[in-house]
Amino acid sequence: MSSREPLVERMRPFGTTIFSEMSALAARTGAINLGQGFPDTDGPPEMLAAAVQALSSGANQYPPLPGIPALRHAIAAHEQRFWGLSRDPDSEVVVTAGATEAIAAAVLALCEPGDEVVCFEPYYDSYAASITLAGAVRRPVTLRPGPDGRYGFDEAELRAAFGPRTRLVLLNTPHNPTGKVFTAEELALIAALCQEHDTWAVTDEVYEHLVFDGVHTPMATLPGMRERTLRISSAGKTFSCTGWKVGWATGPAPLVSAVQRVKQFLTFVNASPLQPAVAVALALPESYFTGLTAGLRANRDRLVAGLTAAGFDVLAPEGTYFVTADIRPLGGTDGVAFCRELPGRCGVVAVPTQVFYDHQEAGRHLIRFAFCKRPEVIDEAADRLKAL
Ligand SMILES: *Cc1c(COP(=O)(O)O)cnc(C)c1O
């Protein structure tokens, strides 16, 4: 056995994710797992039936590199219907193995080694790894809870994050893990900086339909931003099928083509029989999308009430699957220690958000709960949390 360390140096800081540890803890203790964000119910029956149909009628070989035409057309029609963005399905849409692959391919395609990526921390865990794989450097801007109980950022800190090596802004709105929906003013400021510094915007909008207060505005709809924005989304959250890994990127043809160039050597293609099913789902009537939002809004309200009653300082989310809570009123100081003890204390699993920051002290006292679960599961969790 060689004594050589197999993992390249730049990936060594990335251990196994906190989700594995906390999900294993949930399994071992029988606790309710509000750690990882996956729904405990299936997506729309029309979509599931279409997948079964495709699977049993021969859609089992390599689809075309950019995705099957039916899905690319459905993605373009969906963007037109909800966001007024018109896309050419043949040159401005590419299907990917989840939003995760789209993010990785975008960063790998757009960044030279040493280029800088502006992003908002806490961030989705694949961002730091993708940026590192590309040899690029992250320039995090910290989202902090304000006196109004909402997350915001400091304009000066954002301005200072931009510089001559800035290649792109990687923006997630609605934002995981904070549940923040970036406001029109915040987006306008980010857009102005992108234009001033001639950078790309890569936007992760997987929670585009999960907004409970306010509205979601795609960056690509702001003046001057369509030409420089790559918009990423996915079926996973919108259609409760996180295991399917069908995502996509849309944008101007040169950006989409750059992503496709890298993507073809990461996975080439994926999910042949699921692609027609997602095309069906994207064309579902308005009532599907409003029903999804209404159900999750009610779940959010249940969990926020439960956490408040348990004594947490709750940061009510405007969107997504998640709510973050401050553990200090309950005597906690460190989210990692708190989450390791939580299953033993009351049979519930949450995740500490400090692991999603470069400046971990900013999130040391914050933990995240997922509410994409059946109402009775949330009620049971809220009941158990009263033991705190
Ligand atoms: C879940 C999630 C993703 C991953 O989407 P997939 O389609 O499963 O790859 C990407 N970004 C954010 C912010 C997420 O929460």
Image (tube, rainbow, N blue to C red):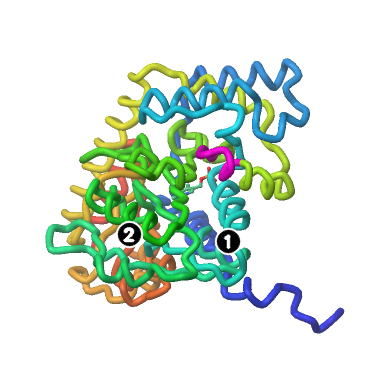
Q: Is residue 37 left or right of residue 109?
A: left
Left/right of residue 147 with respect to residue 162 in the rendered view = left
Give the amino acid type for the residue marked by disc 1 in the picture: Cys
* Identity, as a three-letter code, of the amino acid under mark 2: Cys
What distance separates the C-alpha of mark 2 from that of mark 1?
45 Å
Name the residue furthest left.
147
Residue 111, which numbered label? 1
**Is residue 48 shown above or below 187?**
above
Residue at 35%, 51% in the rendered image:
175
Q: Earlier in the sequence, mark 2 or mark 1?
A: 1
Q: Position of residue 129 (x, y in %)?
A: 56, 64
Q: Bounds of the magenta span?
A: 249-256
Local packing at callout 1 (Cα closer than 10 Å; few below 14, some 14-19, many 20+) is many
Quarter holding residue 363: bottom left
In the image, 227 versus 103, the foreground residue is: 227
Q: Nearer the viewer, mark 2 or mark 1?
A: 1
**Vertical position of residue 173 compared to residue 70: above or below:** below
Q: Mark 2 vs ligand 1: CB under 8 Å? A: no
**Could one spot residue 28 in this view of the protein?**
no
The residue carrying pointer 2 sits among few (fewer than 14), some (14 to 19) or many (20 or more) residues within 10 Å by Cα, namely some
Q: Secondary structure at mark 2?
A: helix
Residue 274 in sight in this render: yes
Q: Which residue is mark 2?
A: 346
Q: Quadrant of residue 11?
A: bottom right
Q: Residue at x 18, y 48 (%)?
A: 305
